[in-house]
Amino acid sequence: MPPPSNLDSIPLFACLSDSDRRELASHAIEVPIQKGQFIFREGDPAEWFHIVKQGNVKCVKSSPEGRDVTLKVLMPGDLFCCEASAFAGEGHPGCAQSMGEGTIVKIHRMVMLDIIQKNPDAAVNIINYLSLRLRESQDNAKAFALDRAEQRVASILVNLTQRSGIQEATGVRIGVRLTHQDLADMAGLTKETTSRILSRFKKNHVIRGTGKKLIIQDLTRLQHMAPHAFS
């Protein structure tokens, strides 16, 4: 499969020189993905860094009962591979599944390590990215421990709006199609509780629509409900 023509659309590599990006692109592989396709599964060797180029990918973890639980949603430009596992050469602790048609970019871990060793700016950029991911995880843990159910759902909706929102006449449409179960998993709630909260938001004219086309009507009010906007 031919390498991608460029990596300019991927913010993670913005610090690289044109020559370094061309070198990295010569080792990168673009892979088309289809809805429901698993990009990797729990336990697979973490030999590749993956980057969303087009579409959306969700991180999934299997529960002890065997149910797949959505942990977070990834947008174009996001690096995903369970980065710590890739750097350590370990197995993936979870799965990555496509939410629709799209494209991912794969870069072998040894190529990425070589670029980091040769380019301090790239190393700093990746450290900053990993620090942001760590802070998101800490915010998630804090929200699960301290926030009420309604606040958790509001935080997720605010974060998705900020990352994928599309302005429309009646509000801001979230650019990712999510089921009530997806939102419940991400908030650490039951589907029933999440559905009740969404119904209350609709009744109060904060949101409208369904998971296929969810529109935020009153983003300011939603932000006031969300002490921790996390993904």
Image (spheres, helix red, strand yellow):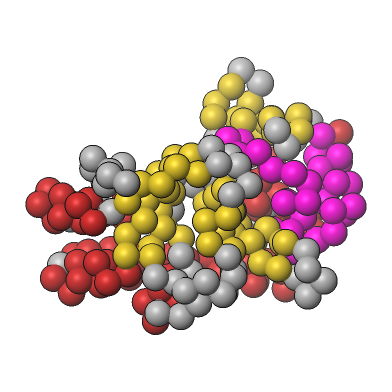
- Residue 201 appears in the picture as rendered: yes
Q: Is residue 70 left or right of residue 15?
A: right
Task: Give the answer, above or below, for where 35 lies relative to 41.
Answer: above
Q: Is residue 194 magenta?
A: yes
Residue 125 belongs to magenta span: no
Residue 3 in picture, x, y percent from top left: 26, 47
Of residues 163 and 155, the one nearer the viewer is 163
Q: Nearer the viewer, residue 109 or 12?
A: 109
> Which residue is at 32% across, 51% downward?
29
Q: Position of residue 149 (x, y in %)?
A: 80, 59
Dominant SS in magenta: helix
Residue at 85% from the left image edge and 53% from the top image edge: 191
Place residue 151 in its image quadrant: bottom right
Q: Identify the residue at the far left of this view.
A: 19
Give the answer, above or below, for where 171 lies relative to 88: above
Residue 188 vertical placement versus 191 (above, below): below
Residue 140 or residue 222, whichever sits in front: 140
